[in-house]
């Protein structure tokens, strides 16, 4: 197989296909991947639709007007799902993923702050558990990242810690609805209430962005009484990943603003492209329209009842799996999968024969991908396993996972000491942040 140079001659399509397919056989089984939040199963009808739309460029709105219309329908549906005051006119767009959506939301916050004419350096307040894209935003767009470190058993941002770091140069506070570290929701309403009190007392009027990469497609269906979205006037924008609990293959993100005032006009480009003027406010330009068509298919296919059924099943599997893990004895649960269908567990203090990294490696030998990693500052001493339950993970598969885990623990219990740590584990990054 060529590694470094383009081959000189052609191959028959059957030969090229087989060569690539054989190499990909060494990848892990996506259905057994409890590391990723990204959708790994869709219905055959959705896969057919993806193939039929793979050649459509999302940016060619004049050439593919119905694809553009499906995008706007999805935006309006999401704005309505998140209780925008006027969902039919709330601005929003599809993106290549949540990372691009977060960049756009951050840019809107920065421009709104800049319009106030403040002389200082802009900053953004967020918990140390945010996904790495927020640190990238701060770096790329020259905003000071005020990261709130973890402390004790507090693993994400809270109102008190956010308020302590806000000043007149804060462009916004990022609240995460579904931490990638442990699956927990941050207290969005409490954070907004604290900022409301600050503004009422003469302090700065700071907007909130909700990073709902996962939770914004879970909470509306399973936690309808939880107030975290545009029902809170201080929430200016929300993003989610269509390719996570939106149930679409990679890569698709969404971002919506509560109203037109929340998205500065100067960020919107009106381009004469291929015979028609179009408005665009994405960082990427050309990308496939297939994920957008697939998202509309899922909205049409499942509706609110269907999404509720799927997400409830995921939560039921997650909470059952967490309970089964706890009953094994060596683990202490940090979360239980009862917010996002995601939970994290660490080892009990008296377990000294092996590490969570040994457990992760042992499960990989059985085909399961369960990441082990350490938490960020100031809890880098805490190493955990994280389990992500997605559509396609059944109760039967969860039982098989627990059976394999028992076998792994029985073998590891005969060790004298741990064999692996964070420095040797492939799922550990230089930031300590797990992938989402």
Image: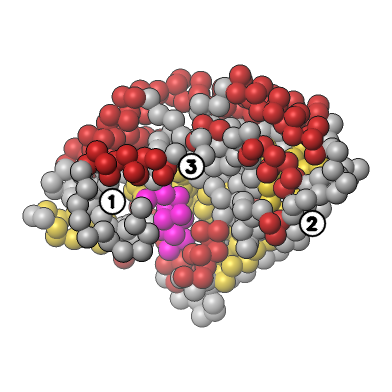
In this picture, which residue range is highlighted in magenta? 96-107
Distance, label 2 to label 3, CA atoms, is 31 Å
Secondary structure type for disc 1: loop
Residue 399 magenta-highlighted: no
Front in this rendered view, residue 412 or 142? 412
Give the number of the disc on residue 3: none
Distance, label 2 to label 1, CA atoms, is 41 Å
Residue 100 magenta-highlighted: yes
Secondary structure type for disc 2: loop
Front in this rendered view, residue 258 or 187? 187
Secondary structure, magenta segment, majority class: helix
Give the number of the disc on residue 27: 3
Q: Which residue is mark 1?
A: 287
Q: What is the image's colouring?
A: secondary structure
Q: Position of residue 140 (x, y in %)?
A: 46, 70
- Do tag 3 and tag 1 residues touch (Cβ < 8 Å)? no
Give the number of the disc on residue 381: 2
Front in this rendered view, residue 153 or 251? 251
Front of the two marks 3 and 1:
3
272 shown above or below 300: below
Front of the two marks 2 and 3:
3
In the drawing, does residue 329 fall left or right of residue 268?
Answer: right
Q: Position of residue 135 (x, y in %)?
A: 55, 64
**Residue 279, located in which quarter of the rendered image?**
bottom left
Secondary structure type for disc 3: loop
In the drawing, does residue 391 fall left or right of residue 350?
Answer: left
- Do tag 2 and tag 1 residues touch (Cβ < 8 Å)? no
Q: Is any atom of residue 265 visible in this view?
A: no
Q: Is any atom of residue 41 visible in this view?
A: yes
């Amino acid at each position: 197989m060529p590694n470094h140079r383009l081959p000189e001659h052609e191959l028959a399509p059957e030969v090229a296909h087989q060569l690539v397919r054989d190499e990909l056989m060494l990848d892990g089984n996506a259905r057994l991947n409890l590391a990723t939040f990204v959708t790994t199963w869709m219905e055959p009808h959705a896969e057919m639709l993806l193939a039929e739309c793979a050649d459509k460029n999302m940016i060619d709105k004049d050439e593919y007007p119905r694809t553009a219309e499906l995008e706007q329908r999805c935006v309006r549906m999401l704005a309505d799902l998140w209780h925008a005051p006027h969902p039919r006119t709330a601005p929003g767009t599809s993106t290549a993923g949540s990372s691009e959506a977060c960049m756009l939301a951050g840019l809107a916050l920065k421009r709104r702050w800049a319009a106030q004419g403040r002389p200082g350096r802009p900053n953004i307040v967020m918990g140390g558990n945010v996904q790495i894209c927020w640190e990238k935003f701060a770096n790329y767009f020259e905003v000071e990242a005020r990261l709130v470190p973890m402390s004790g058993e507090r693993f994400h941002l809270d109102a008190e810690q956010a308020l302590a770091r806000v000043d007149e140069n804060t462009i916004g506070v990022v609240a995460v609805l579904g931490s990638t570290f442990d699956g927990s929701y941050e207290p969005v309403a409490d954070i907004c209430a604290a900022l409301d009190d600050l503004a009422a007392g003469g302090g700065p009027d700071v907007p909130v962005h909700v990073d709902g990469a996962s939770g914004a497609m879970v909470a509306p269906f399973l936690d309808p009484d939880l107030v975290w979205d545009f029902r809170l006037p201080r929430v200016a924008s929300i993003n989610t990943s269509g390719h996570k609990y939106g149930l679409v293959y990679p890569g698709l993100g969404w971002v919506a603003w509560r109203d037109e005032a929340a998205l500065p006009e100067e960020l919107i480009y009106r381009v004469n492209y291929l015979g028609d003027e179009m408005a665009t406010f994405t960082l990427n330009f050309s990308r496939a329209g297939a994920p957008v068509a697939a998202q509309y298919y899922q909205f049409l296919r499942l509706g609110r009842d269907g999404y509720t059924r799927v997400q409830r099943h995921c939560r039921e599997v997650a909470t059952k799996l967490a309970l089964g893990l706890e009953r094994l004895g060596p683990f202490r649960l940090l979360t239980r999968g009862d917010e996002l269908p995601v939970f994290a567990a660490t080892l009990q203090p008296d377990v000294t024969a092996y590490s969570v990294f040994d457990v992760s490696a042992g499960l990989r030998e059985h085909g399961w991908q369960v990441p082990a990693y350490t938490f960020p500052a100031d809890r880098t001493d805490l190493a955990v396993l994280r389990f992500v339950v997605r559509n396609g993970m059944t109760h039967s598969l969860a039982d098989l996972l627990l059976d394999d885990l028992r076998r792994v623990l029985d073998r590891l219990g005969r060790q004298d000491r741990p064999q692996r740590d964070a420095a040797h584990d492939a799922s550990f990054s230089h930031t300590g942040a797990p992938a989402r």
